Amino acid sequence: MKEFTLITGASSGIGLEMTKLLAKEKRNLILVGRNKEQLEELAFILRRIHLIEIHPLVIDLSKIDSPKKIYDYTIEKKLNVVCLINNAGFGYTGEFLNSKIEEDFNMMQVNMNSLVLLTKFFLPSMKKVNFGEILNIASTASFQPGPYMSLYYATKAFVLSFSEGISVELKPHGIYVTAVCPGPTITEFANRANMDGSLLMKKGIAMSAESVAKISIDALKNRKVVKIAGIKNWILAFSIRFLPRIVVRETIKKLNHLRKI
């Protein structure tokens, strides 16, 4: 069976840039995303350039049965997934009090539940061959509470904790887990999360999706368990542990709060 790398959120942002990098390495790919046109166009172009096998899967990970559908597709097509990249995620800026329950549920489903289920489904086949790679995109939000993005920060804290825990359990089976923690990144995420006016997205703080993608793939190859993307983000994440929690909460509140226009 051919070996494949499966990437969620592959049609834009960090996922798109990781897809391009992996295609250059001649990896066969399974691309999961919601935008049918973007996904199929990307698959068509990369097939012709790199002569690799690519399967675009148009699936919404906010749906409870989506991870099982993805897994069933790989079984039906006899695609051996040796590398799983859980990149899909989204958030919103605003008070939790005013958020819609459906939006909250969808965020938890995409950011946490789908990530866990996809990992659970593909681990047995990795264990069988004593090899596998799992890359989970967490966030610098994992290291502190996030007023005005409280639920998003909590989901990313879950991703980091889960990744670190299973990395210890799975290493004896030849399965390597990496959690990458980007800071603010210039992608469609900021627009969807209503973050364009926040201090975090000011020029000089946010990184490019290309930079984060390269850091992520390098971290996976180098078997890093946790990798914070960018020196500025590393300094910020590291310094938080020395500050009183009340100072951290108030600082993040100011950074996340939308500017008054």
Image (cartoon, rainbow, N blue to C red):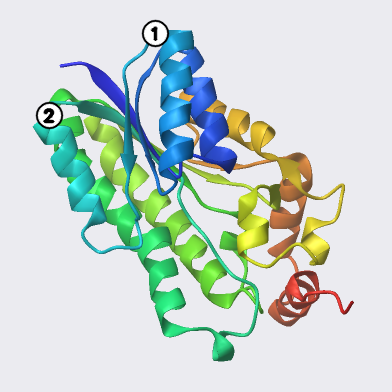
Q: Label 2: how many residues lie within 10 Å, few (<14), some (14-19) or many (20+)?
A: few
Decide if residue 115 is on the left or right side of residue 205: left
Q: Nearer the viewer, mark 2 or mark 1?
A: 1
Vertical placement of residue 121 versus 19, above or below: below
In the rendered image, which residue does mark 1 sit on?
A: 51
Q: Which residue does the image show at 41% across and 15% down from the upper left?
A: 47
Q: Which residue does the image show at 27% across and 27% down from the upper left?
A: 82
- Location of residue 51 by image quarter: top left
Q: Which mark is residue 107?
A: none
Q: Percent x, y for residue 49?
A: 49, 10
Q: Which mark is residue 128?
A: 2
Vertical placement of residue 79 versus 120, above or below: above
- Location of residue 201 by image quarter: bottom right
Number of marks: 2
Q: Percent x, y for residue 46?
A: 46, 18
- Location of residue 109 by image quarter: bottom left
Label 1 residue SS: loop
Label 2 residue SS: helix
Q: Which residue does the image show at 14% across and 28% down from the upper left?
A: 77
> Is residue 219 visible to the viewer in this orientation of the structure?
no
> Is residue 55 visible to the viewer in this orientation of the structure?
yes
Q: CA distance from mark 2 to mark 1?
A: 29 Å
Amino acid beneath label 1: Leu
- Disc nearer the start of the sequence (2/1): 1
Q: Which quadrant, please, contains the C terminus?
A: bottom right
Vertical placement of residue 127 versus 144, above or below: above
Amino acid beneath label 2: Lys
Q: Label 1: how many residues lie within 10 Å, few (<14), some (14-19) or many (20+)?
A: some
Decide if residue 233 is on the left or right side of residue 51: right
Q: Which residue does the image show at 61% across and 31% down from the upper left?
A: 215
Q: Percent x, y for residue 245?
A: 69, 78
Decide if residue 222 is on the left or right side of residue 76: right
